[in-house]
């Protein structure tokens, strides 16, 4: 399993009148954490686009257990629980506060797609090589 952690400080603009993070902001945090996780794997989204691969989101789920609040430091844990074999990759996210309480969980499915044709593709070989070591 691949696990990456990204820390984010909750900004005032991300909260509602109650000082609680607005639910839609979690999806932006998930995306930021995914990009950082891919960077830890040795690639970037830009690298994959140069290889002709794009990764649209096709399915999103979130469960909100506790609120995150203004100025808290939260950690977004990003996990790949299985090595992608075909055209899709599934990221799991968990958001924790500074007390290590689980606040939110998420699951995001993206497809590997050919940038030119828009058809499903497979994971770039360089990404597969980076990930295989986590699944042996």
Image (cartoon, rainbow, N blue to C red):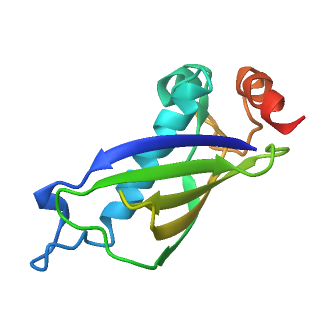
Instruction: Tell me what residue is drawn at x 24 percent, y 57 percent.
Output: 72
- Tell me residue 106's x, y (percent): 54, 65
Residue 87 vs residue 132, the one in the foreground = 132
Q: 65 or 82: which is nearer to us?
A: 65
* Horizontal relation, residue 9 to residue 39: left or right: left
Where's residue 62, x and y in %?
A: 50, 72
**Vertical position of residue 55 compared to residue 59: above or below:** above
Image quadrant occupied by the C terminus: top right
Horizontally, residue 8 falls left or right of residue 78, namely left
Of 27 and 125, the residue lying toward us? 27
- Position of residue 78 measured from the top left corner of the image (x, y, whole percent): 56, 49
25 to the left or right of 53: left
Q: Residue at x 73, y 50 (%)?
A: 88
Quadrant assignment for the N terminus: top right
Q: Is 134 above or below relative to 58?
A: above
Residue 133 occupies which quadrant of the picture?
A: top right
Q: Where residue 94 appears, x then y in whole percent?
A: 52, 60
Furthest toward the front, the residue is 99
């Amino acid at each position: 399993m691949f696990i990456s952690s990204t820390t984010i400080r909750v900004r005032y603009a991300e909260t509602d009148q109650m000082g609680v993070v607005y639910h839609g902001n979690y999806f932006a945090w998930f995306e930021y954490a995914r990009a950082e996780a891919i960077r830890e794997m040795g690639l970037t989204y830009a690298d994959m686009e140069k290889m002709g691969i794009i990764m649209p989101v096709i399915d999103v789920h979130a469960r909100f257990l506790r609120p995150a609040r203004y100025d808290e430091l939260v950690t977004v844990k990003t996990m790949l629980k299985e090595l992608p074999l075909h055209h899709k990759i599934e990221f799991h996210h968990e958001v924790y506060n500074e007390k290590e309480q689980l606040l939110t969980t998420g699951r995001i499915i993206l497809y590997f797609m050919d940038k030119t044709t828009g058809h499903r593709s497979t994971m770039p070989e360089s990404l597969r090589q980076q990930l295989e070591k986590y699944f042996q």
